[in-house]
């Protein structure tokens, strides 16, 4: 019996069920109330919806908006998977050196540790995508941008 309890406790701790939230969980987050930051040299915004600050520990979700001609420099998320759902516009993404066009209605999966970037063509008025990180944290870099009121 003692062995089973100890094993269950170890599994619970490793799975994260024993973690106590440091902030109250917000089950619904209004985009109107979510912090928004300018990114991509002022050519875009990142809306930070669900993340550790709203009590989400396993993943984060935001909205990425970029103007035509904007881009996201090559980078890697060592410990986080990134997924995008393109709501509007189109882009050319480089994922592990492969150029891949993405457009409205496409879903993009980028495994942890994979180098990637994006470029919005000049003739595209705007690009908008829902962005999810499984393993939150990478979205924190957007806070370096100027806050949008």
Image (cartoon, rainbow, N blue to C red):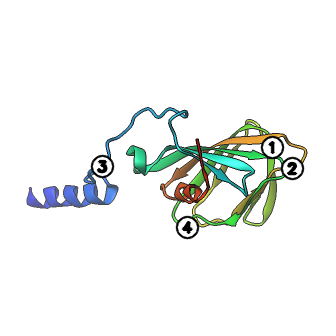
Residue 89 spot, x, y in % from top left: 79, 39
Quarter of the image where one finds residue 90? top right
Earlier in the chain: of badge 1 and badge 3, it is: 3
Left or right: residue 123 compared with residue 134: right
Q: Which mark is residue 121?
A: 2
Residue visible at 61% across and 53% down?
146
- Which residue, given by chain and number where applicable, does mark 4 sit on? 78
Near-viewer residue (134 or 68): 68
Which residue is most to the left?
1
Which numbered disc, 3 or 2, marks the residue that appears first in the sequence?
A: 3
Determine the secondary structure under disc 2.
Answer: loop
Q: Secondary structure at mark 4?
A: loop
Is there CB contact under 8 Å for labels 1 and 2?
yes
Q: In this orientation, which residue lies closer to the viewer: 90 or 83?
A: 90
- Tell me if 73 is positioned left or right of 123 in this view: left
Q: Nearer the viewer, residue 98 or 64?
A: 64
Q: CA distance from mark 1 to mark 2?
A: 8 Å
Which numbered marker is on residue 21?
3
Total number of numbered discs in the rendering? 4
**Residue 41 is drawn in which quadrant?**
bottom right
Q: For this view, does 10 lie left or right of residue 101?
A: left
For marks 1 and 2, the one nearer the N-term is 1
Classify 133 as above or below 106.
below
Q: Are marks 4 and 1 in contact (CB under 8 Å)?
A: no
Q: Residue at x 58, y 41 (%)?
A: 149
From the top left corner, tell me how far across and down residue 144 is, in percent: 58, 59
Q: Is residue 57 visible?
A: yes
Marks 4, 2: nearer the viewer: 2
Instruction: Check disc 1 and report the residue beneath it.
Output: 90
């Amino acid at each position: 019996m003692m062995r089973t309890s100890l094993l269950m406790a170890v599994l619970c701790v490793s799975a994260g069920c024993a973690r106590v939230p440091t902030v109250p969980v917000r089950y619904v987050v209004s985009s109107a109330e979510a912090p928004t930051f300018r990114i991509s040299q002022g050519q875009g915004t990142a809306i930070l919806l669900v993340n550790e600050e709203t009590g989400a520990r396993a993943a984060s979700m935001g909205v990425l908006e970029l103007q035509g001609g904007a881009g996201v420099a090559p980078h890697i998320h060592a410990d986080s998977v990134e997924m995008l759902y393109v709501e509007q516009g189109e882009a050319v993404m480089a994922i592990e050196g492969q150029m891949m066009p993405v457009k409205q209605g496409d879903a993009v999966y980028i495994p942890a540790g994979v180098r990637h970037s994006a470029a919005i063509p000049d003739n595209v008025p705007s690009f908008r995508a829902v962005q999810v990180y499984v393993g939150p944290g990478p979205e924190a870099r957007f806070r370096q941008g100027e806050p949008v009121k």
